[in-house]
Image (cartoon, rainbow, N blue to C red):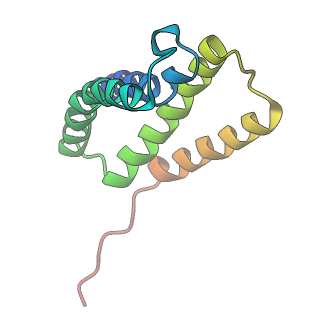
Amino acid sequence: MKVLLLLVASNIFMTLAWYGQLKLKFFEGKSLWTVILISWGIAFFEYCLMVPANRLGYANGMSGYQLKIAQEVITLLVFVVFAWLVLGEKLTWNYAVSFAFILAAVYFAVAFKPAAPTGH
């Protein structure tokens, strides 16, 4: 659970760093280089949360694949909320179907244990 909370928090920072400049008043009128530097500063906090989340998850038995897939789903969930609340965009049917396929990918990534390697 701690891993998922860290991943959610890190993705909130990353979504703000990448997409906040599209609508947030704070970014209005600033040069591209200023926006890049501000976004880079916001992304620093994403790294401060993402790196411990990955280390903790891996130390507790999650594979790199599982961590990455979980991170991508969390990224989409965070973005859907951000797009709705900040960008004013609706989740249309085609995006919802796409999201459902990604959730199916998560199921397949975590529901089955890979076969043990065999010695040759």
Residue in the picture at 80% in, 29% down:
92
Image height of 23 relative to 69, above or below: above
Q: Is residue 117 left or right of residue 85?
A: left
- Residue visible at 31% across and 31% down in the picture: 40
Q: Is residue 59 above or below residue 30?
A: below
Q: Quadrant of residue 97?
A: top right
Q: Residue furthest top?
A: 25
Task: Identify whether 7 is placed above or below 117.
Answer: above
Whole-percent x, y for residue 70 in the image: 44, 40
Extreme residue toward the bottom, this view = 120
Image quadrant in which you'd find residue 10: top left
**Front residue of this view, candidates 94 and 86:** 86
Q: Position of residue 77 (x, y in %)?
A: 55, 27
Residue drawn at the location 56% of the way across and 27% of the way down: 79
The answer to whether 50 appears left or right of 13 in the picture is left
- In which quadrant of the rendered image does the C terminus lie? bottom left
Q: Viewed as shown, does residue 84 lie left or right of 45?
A: right
**Can you give x and y, in whole percent of width and height, for residue 1 in the image?**
33, 24
User: Which of the pair 60/29 is nearer the observer?
Assistant: 29
| Residue closest to the eye, 74 or 43 | 43
**100 with respect to 29 (left or right):** right
